[in-house]
Image (tube, grey):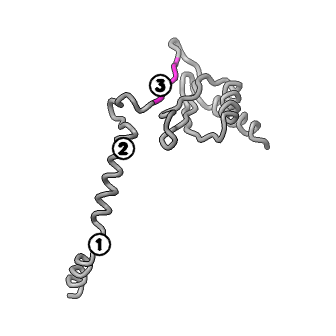
Amino acid sequence: MSPPHRLTRFFTTLHAALKNPSRAIFQFYPSSDDQIALITSIAQRAGFGGGIVVDYPNSKKAKKIFLCLMVGGGSGTQSLPKGLDGEEPVTGDGVAYERRREREKGRKDKKRSAVKNKEWILKKKEVSAF
């Protein structure tokens, strides 16, 4: 089965499984713009609305691509979420990517400082010798 055929089957089955109104959001890593165009066109043919949302578009490491699919809309139309660009602070429970990286770096530094040196090893041998 070819990739477009598998995608068509996947998106039509997903569309049939979702209630009205609902969303499905997928994070994926396309290797080219052609893959993005293929995936979005097949999803739209299956009956989905929505599109692509990119977080941190100018970053190589932090860039994330999301396919946001929407079924129905009810009385109000659903809109795509806004992608993060790293310039505005994230409010609520979210933590900006850069702050999270700094926090993780701090944890690694603490782990590195706890490296077992010669004194620690000798002390541990004395305690366990009894």
Residue 101 is situated, as x and y percent measured from the top left of the image, at 38, 46
Instruction: Evaluate if marks 1 and 2 touch, with contact meaning CB atoms under 8 Å apart.
Output: no
Is disc 3 surrounded by few (<14), some (14 to 19) or many (20+) residues within 10 Å? few
Image vertical order of residue 41 relative to residue 117, above or below: above
Image vertical order of residue 17 relative to residue 21, above or below: below
| Circle number at residue 82 | 3
Query: Which image quadrant is residue 85 in?
Result: top left
Q: Is residue 72 something that shows in the picture? A: yes
Is disc 1 surrounded by few (<14), some (14 to 19) or many (20+) residues within 10 Å? few
Over which residues does the magenta segment extend?
A: 78-84
- Going by the numbered disc 1, the residue's amino acid type is Lys
- Between disc 1 and disc 3, whose residue precedes? 3
Could you tell me which secondary element the residue under label 1 belongs to?
loop
Determine the main secondary structure of the stretch shown in magenta: loop
Q: Is residue 2 left or right of residue 12?
A: right
Residue 80 is situated, as x and y percent measured from the top left of the image, at 52, 23
Quadrant containing the C terminus in the rendered view:
bottom left
In terms of depth relative to the viewer, which is nearer, 41 or 49? 41
Q: Give the residue at x 56% y 36%.
A: 26
Residue closest to the far bottom:
130
Question: Badge 1 is on which residue?
Answer: 116
- Between disc 1 and disc 2, whose residue precedes? 2
Q: Is residue 106 left or right of residue 11?
A: left
- Going by the numbered disc 3, the residue's amino acid type is Lys
Q: Residue 13 colored magenta? A: no
Disc 3 versus disc 2: distance between alpha carbons? Answer: 20 Å
Q: Nearer the viewer, mark 1 or mark 3?
A: 1
Quadrant containing the N terminus in the rendered view:
top right
- Going by the numbered disc 2, the residue's amino acid type is Arg
Residue closest to the far right:
1
- Between disc 3 and disc 2, whose residue precedes? 3
Q: Give the residue at x 62% y 32%.
A: 17
